[in-house]
Image (cartoon, rainbow, N blue to C red):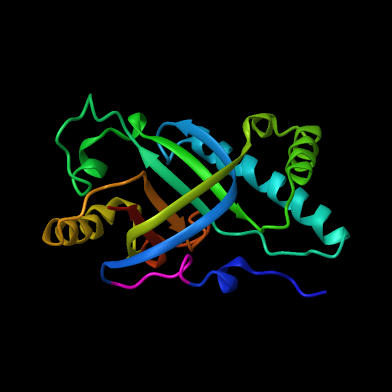
Amino acid sequence: MEKLDLTKKYKTYYNAASKPEIVDIGPARYLSLTGTGDPSGEDFANHVGALYPVAYAIKFRCKARGNDFTVAKLEGQWWFDHGAHPGLTMADAPAKVPRSEWSYRLLIRLPEFVTEEDIAAGIAAAKEKGVSLAADIQPFEMHEGKSLQMMHKGAFSREGETLAVMHDYMVAHNLSHNGLHHEIYLSDFRKTAEDKLKTILREPIK
């Protein structure tokens, strides 16, 4: 049985250069779980931990009928109340908005052959194992389209440096935001040293 690896099938989606580049991102389906608060806190860790039992339950269900796949990389969309923090650039926001005020949508991309029934069964299986947050997980569809992205290497606390480069590119090319800030975590930040982390930073644009 051949195992589907989404990082190989969608190379544009899971790769980024060390300088700003414009890409066209097609539609995709995900497992989604939203929350608010400090990403270094216990609540965020619990949200991350809730997604994986559902994703693996779906994987094993699909594998049983001949559609095995590798569980995809963790991703996240991030936003804050612009009314409470007006005038911040994308580069300023990570340092000037308190971490407790950030909202997030955690995502794990799903193969096209995963059905609504598979998702419901995966959620039910995780709930049976005591994963209470599994009840809040939902399917989510997203089509970002035209986007600006760049690879960030190193600690999350230094993302502002990469975002500043992206911001300057957007200003120079008269581009504006057209969606939520998006991060794809190519490294497992629970196990990887900060200086070794690789994260795709993506901004839908118009």
Give percent across and percent down for residue 107.
Answer: 54, 47
Give percent across and percent down for residue 142.
Answer: 50, 48
Quadrant of the rendered structure where residue 163 is? bottom left
Residue plotted at (67% across, 57% down): 112
Left or right for 195, reference 83: right
Residue plotted at (40% across, 61% down): 199
Quadrant of the rendered structure where residue 136 is? top right
The residue lying furthest to the top in this view is 84
Left or right for 100, reference 8: left
Q: Nearer the viewer, residue 52 or 13?
A: 13
Give percent across and percent down for residue 108.
Answer: 58, 51
Residue plotted at (69% across, 69% down): 4
Q: Which range is magenta?
A: 12-18
In the image, residue 131 sits, relative to residue 197, either above or below, namely: above
How many numbered callouts?
Answer: 0
Left or right for 118, reference 79: right
Q: Is residue 15 magenta?
A: yes
Residue plotted at (18% across, 44% down): 89
The residue lying furthest to the left in this view is 172
Q: Is residue 68 magenta?
A: no
Q: Nearer the viewer, residue 36 or 118?
A: 118
| Quadrant of the drawing holding the N terminus | bottom right
The residue lying furthest to the right in this view is 64
Q: Is residue 198 visible?
A: no
Magenta region, main secondary structure: loop
Give percent across and percent down for residue 6.
Answer: 60, 66
Left or right for 118, reference 39: right
Q: Nearer the viewer, residue 177 or 92?
A: 177
